[in-house]
Image (cartoon, rainbow, N blue to C red):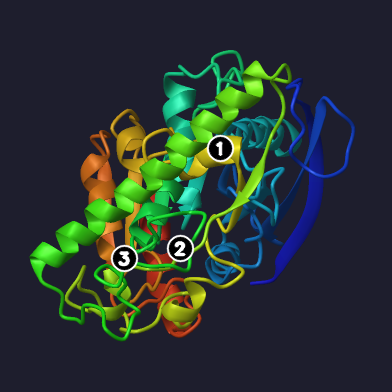
Amino acid sequence: MSVIREPYGYVHSDPGPIKEVYGGPSGQVFVECMRIRPSDVESRTAILFSHPVGGGSFLPLVTALAHGGHHVIYCNTRYRGNDTALILEKCVLDLGACIADAKKRFGYDKIILGGWSGGGSLSLFYQDQAERPTITHTPAGDPVDLTAAKLQPADGIMLLAAHISRSVTLTEWMDPSILDEDQPFKRDNDLNIYADAGEKPPYSAAFVARFRDAQIARNRRITARVKATLAQLQVSGDPHAERPFVVNGTMCDVRWLDPTQDPSDRRPHTCYLGDPRNANDGPVGLARFTTLRSWLSQWSFDESRANGVLNAARISVPVLTINNTADLACTPSHAHRLHAAVASKDKIYVDVPGADHYYIERPDLLAVATKAIAGWLAERGF
């Protein structure tokens, strides 16, 4: 089946006083999208993918769904390719504008959110606020009124190789051996799983509990520091002042080295960024470079509102959860926690044995995932 790719974009208003994306006029946001559809199949339903950082219109699963006869839209948020200053509440605004535009531009009656990877928690956060909007400000206190945004709820959500949230995922990957953010390479060997003299797998339950507690404690120390800095800036006379900062050590998880932790078909001693020991301090780790406001919105364990488990408990539409059992990024416990949290009466869970995060190593398993998705959509008249 031949597939057509149609790039397009739309502009929507954002009167916020703080500009955190490069280029473009103040008060407006340009969002780029791509529609991928079969050349000879019409549909009144679109599967709409979005991710906080975007960039997924050529993902194997996205393309396979279009080849399977489905209309797919990939919506890049304003933060396409750069999450340095990303505000998740504004990602919700971009996604809401995309849904409204797709219905008007293409005439779709139903929208199913394709929540792949980090798009899973964004989809749940969006649906939570579309069904019962409550947010009028970011965690930093800046205005972003989702109650007045007229967000249109989606008709269903698919959680596809999705993790719980950016904040929870980062926290579970933070290096707890860093005790002082100003001296990030002076580390506590009792908690440093990459140190030659450190704890070795298989890890004891007591060590894992101490490790996890220390990860949360480190996230909270950074959050406290961020809040204190913001408070100082606000009393200085410039309430819109911002500060960037570096976060070291963000790919440190006992799961990468010990396959008994969150057991699955994944290979030990690796992660989706390669060797986790190198990725821990490499240039492309999660939250490596961020800002005060962005930390509170997307990375803070306590302050971020985009928490899939909490958001899932407040939605009502049908939900399909697909877990890839060899996933090196989103491990089974995330899929299980999300599925258990979904409040919808109609929720289905599916394992795809042997599938990796991107279906790169096992492209043959794309057919298994797309068949499960197609069946789920057809059963619900989507």
Density class for disc 3 (Cα within 10 Å; few <14, some 14-19, many ≥20) is: many
Give x and y (percent) for residue 14. Answer: 75, 25
**Residue 84 percent across, percent down from the top left:** 65, 49
Type of the residue with mark 3: Thr
Could you tell me the amino acid type at mark 2?
A: Thr
Mark closest to the chain's N terminus, 3 or 2: 2
Closest to the observer: 311 or 8? 311
Is label 1 in a helix, a strand or a loop? helix
Q: Secondary structure at mark 3?
A: loop
Between 274 and 95, which is closer to the camera in this rendering?
A: 274
Q: Quote the CA–CA distance across marks 1 and 3.
A: 23 Å
Q: Is residue 134 left or right of residue 83?
A: left
- Kindly state the secondary structure of the residue where label 2 is placed: loop
- Of tags 1 and 2, the one toward the viewer is 2
Write down the quadrant of residue 201 in the picture: bottom left
Q: Residue at x 35, y 30 (%)?
A: 315
- Residue located 66% across and 35% down the image: 94
Count neighbours of disc 2 (C-alpha within 10 A) and say few if under 14, some if 14 to 19, many if 20 or more.
Answer: many
- Which label belongs to residue 371? none
Residue name at image x 88 percent, y 38 percent: 24
Reply above or below: 111 against 75. Answer: above
Residue 331's tag is 3
Distance Cα–Cα, label 3 vs label 2: 17 Å
At 32% from the left and 63% from the top, the residue drawn is: 323
Whichever of labels 1 and 3 marks the residue nearer the N terminus, that label is 1
Residue placed furthest toward the top: 148
Q: Is residue 382 something one can see in this rendering?
A: no
Q: Give the number of the disc on residue 88.
A: 1
Q: Which residue is mark 2?
A: 250
